[in-house]
Image: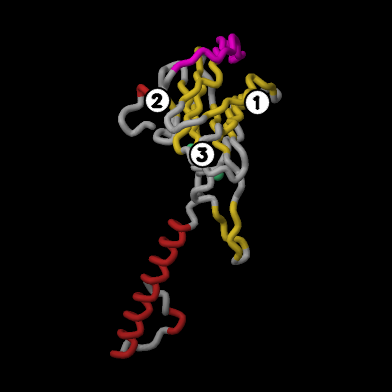
Amino acid sequence: MRIRSRFYRPATGSDAFTDLLFNALLGFAFMFFVAFMLMAKPDQTGKIDSKAEFIITVSWPDFHPDDIDVLVEDPRGQVLWFENKDTEVMHLDRDDRGSFHDQLIIDGQKISNPINQETVSLRAWVPGEYVVNVLHYKANYKEPVPVTVKIEKLNPEISLVYYGVHELNRIGMEVTAARFVLDNSGQPKSVNSLQKSLLSRLGPKAG
Ligand SMILES: [Ca+2]
Ligand SMILES: [Ca+2]
């Protein structure tokens, strides 16, 4: 690489050393660039797919320390949850763990993000039944936690498929908030809350 060609002089011992130094600097600059690119890689968590067809929002009171999880089974039997945040058609934005890891540093000041929310987007839909469960993964109090579940269809305009509040009061408690069937045109039918455990199918890590 003739980077120094504008300043060409006959090569001397010190020039060879300068070349070596310059190449080493280039190497460092390249490594720094690569490291920066890795650091600057956008964090996919918290991102909502703007092309989603349906959004499922599970939330519980601000600043509450408990960890609640959403689990969604699609018509093909695939289950989306914190151990499996992506399927072909569904995406979970993040595993909100209550107040754990909710501290932010803004202008040198440590503040707590009050929000407790997990959001599932359905990028596409397939006909059949979806099951939406909520799980009390970590409990800190004996009092029940009110968990709000909202399911919205986004296209062609936002419409509510389901809205309800479910109380969870112990570790491992799993509740089916809603089951709904999408017909061949993507229209939600027969919304109900018949209980169905998804956790029992997910192996020893669950609970
Ligand atoms: Ca969670
Ligand atoms: Ca939180």
- Mark 3 and mark 1 in contact (Cβ < 8 Å)? no
Q: Split into 4 quadrants, where in the image is the C terminus? A: top left
Ligand 2 is found in which quarter of the picture? top right
Estimate the x, y position of residue 168 in percent, counting from the top left.
Answer: 52, 29
Estimate the x, y position of residue 161 in percent, counting from the top left.
Answer: 64, 19
**Kind of residue at badge 3:** Tyr
Question: The magenta stretch spans which residues?
Answer: 180-196
Counting residues from the start of the chain, the first of labels 1 and 2 encountered is 1
Q: Which mark is residue 199?
A: 2
**Kind of residue at badge 2:** Leu
Residue 78 visible? The answer is: yes
Residue 96 visible? The answer is: no
Estimate the x, y position of residue 99 in percent, counting from the top left.
Answer: 53, 47
Q: Is mark 1 within 8 Å of ligand 1?
A: no
**Kind of residue at badge 1:** Leu
Measured in 3D between alpha carbons, the distance from the residue under mark 1 to the one under mark 3, in whole angstroms, is 36 Å
Residue drawn at x 42%, y 79% is 4
Q: Which mark is residue 141?
A: 3
User: Mark 2 Cα within 10 Å, few/some/many (few <14, many 20+)?
Assistant: many
Secondary structure at badge 3 equals: loop
Does the magenta-highlighted stretch encompass residue 38? no
Estimate the x, y position of residue 136 in percent, counting from the top left.
Answer: 47, 32
Q: Which mark is residue 154?
A: 1
